[in-house]
Image (tube, grey):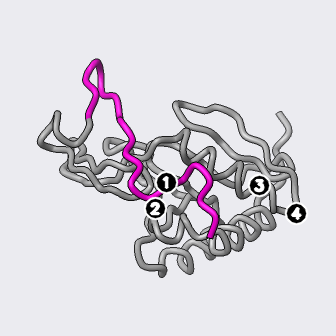
Amino acid sequence: MRFGSWRRGDVATWRRGDDVVDGRADERVTEHRFGGTLGSTGSEGLTMVVHDPKVLKSRLELLAEDLPFEVTSRPMMGGSIGYADGRTFVSISAGGFGVKLLPGDQERALARPGAARMRHSPEEPESKSCITFSEIDTADDEFMMEWLRFAAETAPAKEKR
């Protein structure tokens, strides 16, 4: 397993307004020491793990070196969108490393322990197309390479504007 800048025990900070939330500054936030994440409770009482998008983008760049297609990314709303040969196949944000899948494939992915529909923030609804995997699965190169290849193969062609 290769971790690159993705290291166990990393702790990310998450900014909410002018306050830096570090697991102690806000009682609604608890620290989870794996992959640089913090847990947060949203306005509806929903809990999500908050990730550092820069760490996740580094993870994508590291994995991209061994993928059989060109991977590019573009900044988008505090995170990034990842493209496989110009087609959207991942979404990276504070909500995690979301792999974009077709509806029929999402059910298979959601059967994995720890898999969930991506949520970009505690206040936002679940994604209809992106699935995040457990921290253990996300740190596993072979596992992620398999799902990234699959997402790239099934990604719809780029729409012309």
Q: Earlier in the sequence, mark 4 or mark 1?
A: 4
Residue bearing the label numbered 1:
127
Q: Is residue 12 magenta?
A: yes
Q: Residue at x 63, y 45 (%)?
A: 58
Q: Earlier in the sequence, mark 3 or mark 1?
A: 3
Q: Give residue 117's mark.
A: 2
Tell me whether circle 1 and circle 2 mark residues in contact (CB < 8 Å).
yes
- Which element carries disc 1, helix, strand or loop? loop
Q: Is residue 20 magenta?
A: yes
Residue at the far left in the pictured view:
27
Tell me whether circle 2 and circle 3 mark residues in contact (CB < 8 Å).
no
Q: What secondary structure do most residues of the magenta stretch adopt?
A: loop
* Label 2, label 3: how far apart the Cα atoms are: 23 Å
Tell which of 4 and 133 is nearer to you: 4
Residue bearing the label numbered 4:
68
Tell which of 34 and 81 is nearer to you: 34
Q: Quadrant of residue 73?
A: top right
Q: Residues within 10 Å of mark 4 (few under 14, many from 20)?
A: few
Q: Residues within 10 Å of mark 2 (few under 14, many from 20)?
A: many
Q: Earlier in the sequence, mark 2 or mark 3?
A: 3
Relative to residue 120, is residue 116 depicted above or below? below
Residue bearing the label numbered 3:
64
Q: Residues within 10 Å of mark 3 (few under 14, many from 20)?
A: some
